[in-house]
């Protein structure tokens, strides 16, 4: 039976550590609760080191902070004692400092949401809005639980997208490095042999040697051109107009994947906010901030305007033409049945699953295409060199 190491707290606030045997993590949590302690951290011993590495940064520890705070408040501990406990057990110096600052603000009379708002790099506007709604509704522990689920789902989705891009990135870097090595180190050795032949060389070989010599002699000019072009383009893309045009281009090139990703993000965020008691208009504003594509985000402004005019949310979203028809139909049904929050979360789950499938299909096309491009470039280099070698062999003695 697996053995889990745990960190827990008693109702008096004392920290206890140990190990517990259980068939799975959920059973281990229930077993600990039955002994009268509140489990805060639970992991198999072999995973503990990895957990510590992840929790070194305050941003990375946000999910841990949220789930632990939810567990403490659900067990009936006061907010200040819960924060004090989390400050003691936090493995990140930065997070420990942030929690102590929040605790100090609360003891000085500030609301929990106001204390969190003073640390915008860690706690987003969405996070603070949900906490404020939980404070007003007297259900802070429930809201923290929903926030934990939201952060965990968002992290899983982000990790899936990042992992899907790892192989293409490695392929481009290794392929590009191979081509540069061939052009700058391998070909110059052959150029000495070919130099006496001059115009007798085949045209592809002459072109290849010209590129190789130019790259070897004037690499610094190429580097300056690349850097000189990169920074202006980067600055333009970061500007409001440039970002909008870049996002519009992405919609045209990979529109299916982009729409699924943004639909999942928007619906997950909006559904969680509404379910936590945040007013619809404020929830729309917060949900807009999680969208990465500015074309879709700007369309949400029109949705908010339509909602203010009493059109609800389904009709303005349909008029915006930014989300897939299935998502719009499900949102419309949710609005008509009075279960908009539940339906939004179902839409998010549906499109998170379809996004994984769309990414798999996209990668299945992208990877062979990248391999083909690299093969054509390297093939051209090899064939050009062979043509040069054959031309030497054909020379009369």
Image: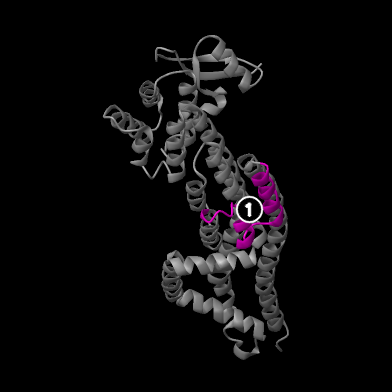
Main secondary structure along the magenta-highlighted residues: helix
Magenta residues (range): 308-337
Q: Is residue 27 above or below residue 146?
A: above
Q: Is residue 261 above or below residue 109?
A: below
Please state, as top left, top right, bottom left or bottom right, where the N terminus lies in the image: top right
Residue at the (26%, 29%) spot, across then down? 108
Q: Is residue 192 visible?
A: no
Task: Pick out the residue farthest to the left.
Answer: 108
Residue at the (38%, 36%) spot, across then down? 113
Q: Is residue 182 visible?
A: yes
Q: Is residue 379 above or below residue 145?
A: below
Q: Quadrant of residue 236?
A: bottom left
Classify residue 390 as left or right of residue 320.
right
Which residue is disc 1 drawn over? 314
Residue at the (42%, 40%) spot, across then down? 128
Please state, as top left, top right, bottom left or bottom right, where the C terminus lies in the image: bottom right
Classify residue 111 as left or right of residue 22.
left
Where is residue 42 shown, x and y percent of the image? 54, 23
Residue in front for this viewpoint, 108 or 31: 108
Task: Pick out the residue farthest to the top.
Answer: 35
Taking the magenta stretch, the answer to whether it contains residue 229 is no
Taking the magenta stretch, the answer to whether it contains residue 329 is yes
**How many residues crowd mark 1 within 10 Å: few (<14), some (14–19), many (20+)?**
many
Q: How is the image coloured?
A: one colour
Where is residue 229 shown, x and y percent of the image? 45, 73
Residue in front for this viewpoint, 112 or 4: 112
Where is residue 43 shown, x and y percent of the image? 55, 24
Q: Number of marks in the image?
A: 1
Where is residue 146 shown, x and y percent of the image? 54, 34
Q: Secondary structure at mark 1?
A: helix
Residue at the (60%, 79%) spot, across then down? 208
């Amino acid at each position: 039976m697996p053995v889990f190491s745990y960190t827990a707290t008693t109702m008096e606030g004392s920290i206890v550590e140990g190990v517990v045997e259980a068939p799975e993590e959920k059973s281990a949590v229930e077993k600990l609760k039955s002994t009268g302690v509140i489990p805060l951290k639970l992991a198999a011993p072999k995973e503990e080191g990895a957990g510590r590495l992840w929790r070194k940064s305050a941003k990375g520890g946000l999910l841990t902070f949220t789930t632990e705070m939810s567990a403490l408040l659900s067990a009936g501990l006061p907010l200040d004692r819960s924060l004090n406990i989390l400050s003691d057990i936090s493995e990140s110096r930065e997070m420990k400092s942030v929690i102590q600052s929040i605790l100090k603000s609360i003891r000085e009379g500030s609301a929990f949401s106001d204390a969190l708002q003073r640390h915008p790099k860690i706690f987003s506007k969405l996070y603070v809005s949900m906490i404020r709604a939980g404070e007003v509704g007297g259900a802070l522990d429930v809201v923290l639980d929903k926030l934990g689920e939201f952060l965990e789902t968002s992290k899983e989705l982000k990790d899936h997208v990042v992992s899907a891009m790892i192989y293409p990135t490695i392929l481009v870097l290794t392929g590009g490095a191979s081509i540069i090595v061939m052009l700058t180190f391998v070909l110059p050795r052959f150029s000495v042999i070919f130099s006496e032949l001059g115009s007798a060389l085949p045209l592809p070989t002459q072109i290849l040697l010209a590129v190789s010599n130019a790259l070897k002699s004037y690499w610094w000019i190429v580097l300056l051109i690349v850097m000189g072009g990169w920074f202006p383009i980067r600055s333009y893309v970061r500007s409001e107009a440039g970002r909008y045009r870049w996002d519009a281009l992405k919609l045209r090139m990979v529109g299916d994947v982009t729409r699924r990703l943004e639909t999942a993000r928007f619906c997950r965020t909006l559904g969680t906010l509404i379910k936590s008691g945040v007013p619809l208009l404020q929830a729309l504003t917060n949900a807009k901030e999680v969208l990465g594509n500015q074309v879709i985000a700007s369309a949400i402004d029109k949705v908010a305007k339509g909602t203010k005019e009493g059109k609800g949310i389904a009709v303005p979203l349909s008029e915006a033409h930014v989300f897939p028809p299935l998502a719009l139909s499900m949102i419309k049904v949710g609005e008509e049945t009075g279960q908009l929050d539940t339906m939004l979360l179902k839409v998010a789950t549906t499109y998170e699953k379809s996004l994984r499938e769309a990414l798999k299909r996209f990668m299945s096309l992208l990877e062979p295409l990248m391999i083909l491009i690299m093969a054509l470039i390297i093939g051209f280099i090899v064939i050009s060199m062979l043509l040069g070698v054959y031309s030497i062999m054909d020379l009369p003695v």
